[in-house]
Amino acid sequence: MASMITSLIDLNADLGEGFGRWTLTDDEALLSVVTSANVACGFHAGDPSIMRRVCAMAAERGVRIGAQVSYRDLAGFGRRSMDVPAGELADEVAYQIGALEVFARAAGSRVSYVKPHGALYNRTVHDPGQAGAVVAGVRMAAGAAGLPVLGLPGSLLLSAAEAAGLPAVPEAFADRAYTPAGTLVPRGEPGAVLHDPDAVVARAVRMAAEGVVTASDGSPVALRARSLCLHGDTPGAAGLALRVREALGAAGVRVEAFA
């Protein structure tokens, strides 16, 4: 993966990850910090009322709305890998985008991009069938105009998006550990998620300003990213997101949504 020093970074967060009376993310607080909102579309979390509320708040604050599509896995929060036939997966991706689009348009906005969640995100890094199915679903929902797709740099998902004529947006994760190959350390392994706020802030600034992340073995890895994910389901997520944004500004990195 080639290095690219950038002074522009988009901040995205996973929002609307509740269901009924159960809530997980502090959507209102995070929407005051991020520039892009990955809204759960009902398959791993979220329900119609939550989707409507998050879209309304995002539109009011000028935050771009993205469809966070997933395997159909409410019980497992979308973090269990599934062998879904490509045609069925494409239909399910299109279905989720279409559902969110209804609420985005009702709020005076629209779905501006697509990002897979959890197991689907990780599967599309190396599985050409699942990556192609996600892209086919995006095409089905968005038509000729298409939609940008967020994914891991060097992933098959971004390659499939580019091949289909869709904007491919590479992203990095401020609070996740990386392997020397530039992929995410699986959540089940020790140290996969960073919990030290100072370390998360420092890592975010280095990734955005220098295009480099320190891998789990201590080696530097070039990481070209246009968007930075700040997870919304960790304790103190909103406060940490604000710290990251302030630190980026102090380092001369402009926070701006991708085109």
Image (tube, grey):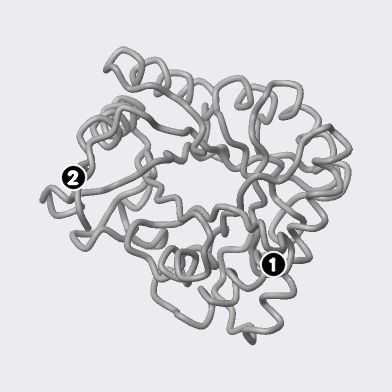
Categorize mark 2 by other alpha carbons within 10 Å: few (<14), some (14-19), many (20+). Answer: some
Q: Which of 152 and 3 is in front in this view?
A: 3
Please report whichever mark, 2 or 1, sits nearer to the chain's N-terminal start. Answer: 1
Which residue is located at x 83 percent, y 50 percent? 47
Q: How far apart are marks 2 and 1 (CA)?
A: 33 Å
Which residue is located at x 74 percent, y 57 percent? 97
Q: Which of 94 and 175 is in front in this view?
A: 94
Placement of 185 over or under 125, stated as above or below: above
In-image side of 203 versus 160 (left or right):
left
In-image side of 8 versus 257 (left or right):
left
Q: In which quarter of the image is residue 182?
A: bottom left
Q: In which quarter of the image is residue 16?
A: top right
Determine which residue is flagged by label 1.
93
In-image side of 2 versus 98 (left or right):
left
Instruction: Kindly give the residue lying farthest to the front in the view shown.
Output: 144
**Residue 129 % position (x, y):** 51, 83
Which residue is located at x 56 percent, y 64 percent? 79
Categorize mark 1 by other alpha carbons within 10 Å: few (<14), some (14-19), many (20+). Answer: many
Placement of 200 over or under 172, stated as above or below: above
Q: Kindly state the secondary structure of the residue where label 2 is placed.
A: strand
**Residue 63 % position (x, y):** 64, 29
Instruction: Kindly give the residue lying farthest to the left in the view shown.
Output: 219
> Are the residues at dot 2 and dot 1 in contact (C-beta closer than 8 Å)?
no
Which residue is located at x 76 percent, y 22 percent? 60
Amino acid type, residue under disc 1 in the picture: Val
**Residue 113 % position (x, y):** 61, 49
Residue 214's label in the rendered image is 2
Q: Which of 172 and 235 is in front in this view?
A: 172
Amino acid type, residue under disc 2 in the picture: Thr
Residue 141's label in the rendered image is none
